[in-house]
Amino acid sequence: MGYCVICGALSQPAASLAIGGHLICSGCERAITVIEPADPAYDFYSSGLKRIWRLV
């Protein structure tokens, strides 16, 4: 078990995307693949991905 680095949700590693040892839950993974830059949530997901690269 681990926590999604973007939203903080508890997530199973087998059901999550792992980047550099950090998990992204399936909900965030789905959102990231379809979000448009004009979407108000874009900055939330973008900053979450940037956080991964700072942690690695």
Image: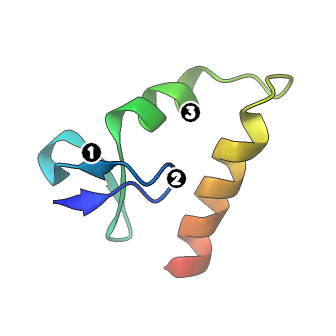
- Residue at 66% in and 62% down: 50
Mark 1 element type: loop
Is residue 39 toward the left or the right of residue 45 in the image? Answer: right
Q: Quadrant of residue 18?
A: bottom left
| N-term mark: 1 or 3 | 1
Image point 40% across, 31% down: which residue? 27
The amino acid marked with disc number 2 is Ile
Residue 12, image x and y in percent? 16, 49
Q: Amino acid at mark 1?
A: Ser
| Mark 2 burial class by Cα count in 10 Å: few <14, some 14-19, many 20+ | many
User: Closer to the observer: label 2 or label 3?
Assistant: 2
**In the structure shown, which secondary structural element does the residue marked by tag 2 occupy?**
loop
Image quarter where the N terminus lies is bottom left
In the picture of the structure, the residue carrying the numbered disc 1 is: 16
Which quarter of the picture shows residue 51?
A: bottom right
Q: Position of residue 31 (x, y in %)?
A: 53, 27
Q: Position of residue 26 (x, y in %)?
A: 34, 34
User: Which of the two residues, 34 or 3, is positioned nearer the viewer here?
Assistant: 3
Q: Is disc 1 in contact with disc 3, using a CB cutoff of under 8 Å?
A: no
